[in-house]
Amino acid sequence: MKVAFLLIFAVISCSKREHKIIQNKGSDTIVNLAQAWAEEYQKIVPAVGLAVSGGGSGTGIAALINGTVDIANSSRPIKDEEKAQALKNSGKEVQEFVVGLDALAVFVHPSNTLEGLSLEEIACIYGQDGKCNTWSDVKPGLVVPGCQDNKIIRVSRQSNSGTYEYFREAVLGTKTDFKQGSMDLNGSREGVDLVEKTPCAIGYAGMGYITQGVKALCVSKTKDANCVKPTLETATDKTYPIARELYMYISGTPTPEVKAYMDWIQGDAAREIIIKSGFVPVPKK
Amino acid sequence: MEDNLTKKVPVPMEWRHRKRSKPKAEKAIEFVIKAGGYSSIVLILAILFFISKEAFPFLVNRFEFSEFFFSTNWNPASVNKVSYGILSLIAGTLAVTCLSMLIAVPLGLACAFYISEFCDPRMREIYKILIEFLAAIPSVVWGFVAIMMINPLIISLFKVPIGLNVLNASIILALMSLPLIVSVGEDALRAVPETYREAAEAMGATRWEIATRVLFPAAKNGLMAAALLGVGRALGETMAVLMATGHSIQIPKSLFDPARTLTATIAAELGESPKGGEHYQALFVIGLALFCISFVVNLSADYLIRGRSKK
């Protein structure tokens, strides 16, 4: 009996010690990445539990303000009034960490002679009011070899993916929908695969998904501006027009567990996971 | 003497034992079988209840019959005007299902006839294993076959801009439902008594005549069931059709137009739509519509089989 009690006591005290759980919530764009980080981190530090959930950047920041999460994920920078509110609520300053970069490449089939597009031209292809339905509508005289009728095949994503939303926001603006009739595939990899095999196609995906089989276009803000190739450097110095930073926010001085986790996220193991997830790691200082 | 006749003869112990225990065991078995039978009804009702429960708020608050069934505009994530119209999704589902069955049913039944009647008995087992192996391929793999192999093939063969279309999805779905049709069809043919074949042979019928005039009518219901199971398989498939149709919202006007099906829409969007939201509920209404469609298909097929066998 005594032994049994001791055992039970040992189990309880053990599980109590393991009950250090870091709550992590926010952006749906980052949620897969955060999940991958959490899984890997728990292999290294099993004593710390990580609860990762999505819901959107706003939801995460709101939860941070209310003090119900330790780390908020966000694909947009925190607003000043949100900072002020957090300070008012808890008396603590919000700390910002840039944990990665999300750069969307626009790509075509390698046989397409097109080299670059401006944001307006991409909007003309993808936007609901855009009139570009054939390749010669985009650039007069452009004929894509192997592409029947010179028709543009738009490859897009399902309507609730983070990539879909960011592309719409960055290229079409906040008031315009996608043109109907695009191929709304269920993953970035499928999109790249499809464009690789379809001369008529154009697609977009996180930079990490681009393969040798497709041609990433250089993108310019306006028709006359210089166009920029999506690379690590152009994504980090923000000259590439369709790139954004991904953030994690914590409130005040972190607990030792949270601090250790944030340090690990900026290390090499975490950087590898960023690349695997299709994002771009932040350049080392 | 009379006493002796009316007097009850004591039943030997072992008899009594047998007599009493048999109904008990039978009752238990009966109960288990009954429970099994009812459980399928209960499960169907539970699924229907669950789907309806999730769909109900949408049906009350947002649902407009004419928009939902006659609009081609499905755009739950719109920034201007959110709309839920499933006409093009229904058209896509019907187009892909019908065409795939046009390919799979004749092919599958022919294959069943060959394996059951014409094939070398030693080869039969090998063929059966090979065909059942088709059923073991996961649907995501079929989807990749559609994108990476059939898509470029259709583009270069038919000179069309895109190879993810109704034709592509139908080929994939036909291949996926083939094993089901073949094995059920083959079972139906095997179930025809050997005496039928012998009688026909005795009358001088050729193998072809036996197959078409004796076996086909005799196994008709079973073959019909095989075809129907194929339809169910094609109607319910998600991942492979998601990739093979191109998942594009439009009413397909030719074999080479991309399309989108009801099931693929649910599969693609349910995972990331917030639980309890309008979009989430709308997807359950699609589920309900799908439920009704398959119910009607099964019912009419049942009616067809019964109506014919009465004659």
Image (tube, coloured by chain):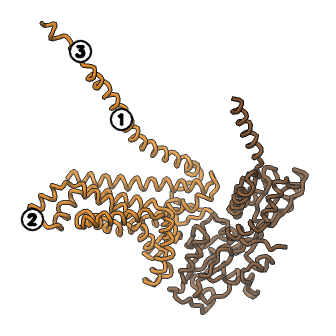
Chain colours: A brown, B orange
Q: Which residue is mark 3?
A: B10
Most foreground residue, A30 or B166: A30
Badge 3 amino acid: Pro
For disc 1, the chain is B
Q: Is residue A59 visible?
A: no
Q: Would you call the spot at circle 2 few (<14 residues within 10 Å), some (14-19), or many (20 or more)?
A: few
Q: Which badge, 3 or 2, is on the more N-terminal residue?
A: 3
Residue under the point 73% across and 71% down: A102
Q: Which residue is mark 1?
A: B29
Q: For residue A80, what is the image quadrant?
A: bottom right
On screen, residue A53 above or below A155: above
Q: Is residue A253 left or right of residue A179?
A: right
Q: Is residue B105 left or right of residue A254?
A: left
SS at circle 1 = helix
Q: The N terminus of chain A is located in which quarter? A: top right
Q: The C terminus of chain A is located in which quarter? A: bottom right
Most foreground residue, A150 or A201: A201
Q: What distance separates the C-alpha of mark 1 from that of mark 2?
A: 48 Å
Q: Is residue B310 left or right of residue B59?
A: left
